[in-house]
Amino acid sequence: VAEVEGVFPHRDELLTALVIDAYEESGTAMEEADRNACAAGASAGTRLLAVTRALRTWSFDNSAAFTLIYGSPVPGYHAPQDTVPAATRTPAVLAGIVRSALAAGELTPPRRTVPGPPLLRPEAVQLFGGTPDAPFADLVERGMVLWSNLIGLLVFQVFSRTHDSVRDESAYFDFAIAVAAESIGLVVPLDGTPGREDTA
């Protein structure tokens, strides 16, 4: 304890270090999975499944770190700007896959584009690389929905919210990712390949 207090004299400094570590580790897991998928010549849909599975595995194996960054906020703690670069690594992986799919013509145009003013802040649009042309003008917003679905799904599974209602957590995860990916026009092939051996 004394050694920790010597390095982090204040609680917020320790929390910030832990938050950054959690984001960096989860980002690394997704980036490595994407590199491996790309090396194998995977489609964008297969890459998406690979990186989301990697984040799921990391989340189960590091549930305390997952809870710190995606669970209930720590009372009185507000993450500083120092955490932003690390926090953007995981959504940046998803954005990169979606951009690649768009460039390769792997996305199916949506049946309708959601009308109205831009829904996201410029920083989020910049992370994606700008707003695509029609018919994918709302692709960044759809990508945010995909990201939100992923994190919400992980929260449900890590905190055992689906344990009593789902037969196979891994298969359900893959199915949910495939369904969510349809919102951006991306096909995720489900060939029965196992995602993660559940211990529960």
Image (cartoon, rainbow, N blue to C red):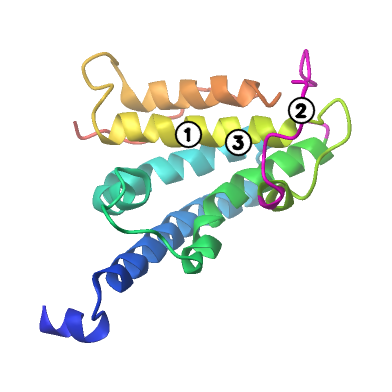
Q: Which residue is mark 1?
A: 150
Is residue 113 shown left or right of residue 141? right
Give neighbour class at mark 2: few <14, some 14-19, many 20+ (Cα, 10 Å): many
Q: Which residue is mark 3?
A: 144
Is residue 168 shown left or right of residue 164? right
Closer to viewer: mark 3 or mark 2:
3
Q: Residue at x 64, y 22 (%)?
A: 183
Q: Residue at x 82, y 31 (%)?
A: 137
Vertical position of residue 24 compared to residue 7: above or below: above
Q: Position of residue 146 (x, y in %)?
A: 57, 31
**Sequence order check: which comes first, mark 3 or mark 1?**
3
Q: Position of residue 62 (x, y in %)?
A: 28, 51
Counting every numbered tag in the picture gives 3
Vertical position of residue 11 compared to residue 113: above or below: below
Q: Position of residue 143 (x, y in %)?
A: 64, 35
The answer to whether any part of residue 195 appears in the image is no
Is residue 174 shown left or right of residue 121? left
Q: Which residue is mark 2?
A: 107
Dot 3 falls on a residue whose secondary structure is helix
Give neighbour class at mark 3: few <14, some 14-19, many 20+ (Cα, 10 Å): some
The stretch drawn in magenta includes residue 118: yes
C-alpha distance separating marks 3 and 2: 16 Å
Closer to viewer: mark 1 or mark 2:
1
Closer to viewer: mark 3 or mark 1:
3
C-alpha distance separating marks 1 and 2: 19 Å
Dot 1 falls on a residue whose secondary structure is helix
The answer to whether any part of residue 120 appears in the image is yes
Q: Residue at x 36, y 67 (%)?
A: 16
Q: Quadrant of residue 44?
A: top right
The residue range painted magenta reads 105-123
Q: Quadrant of residue 2?
A: bottom left
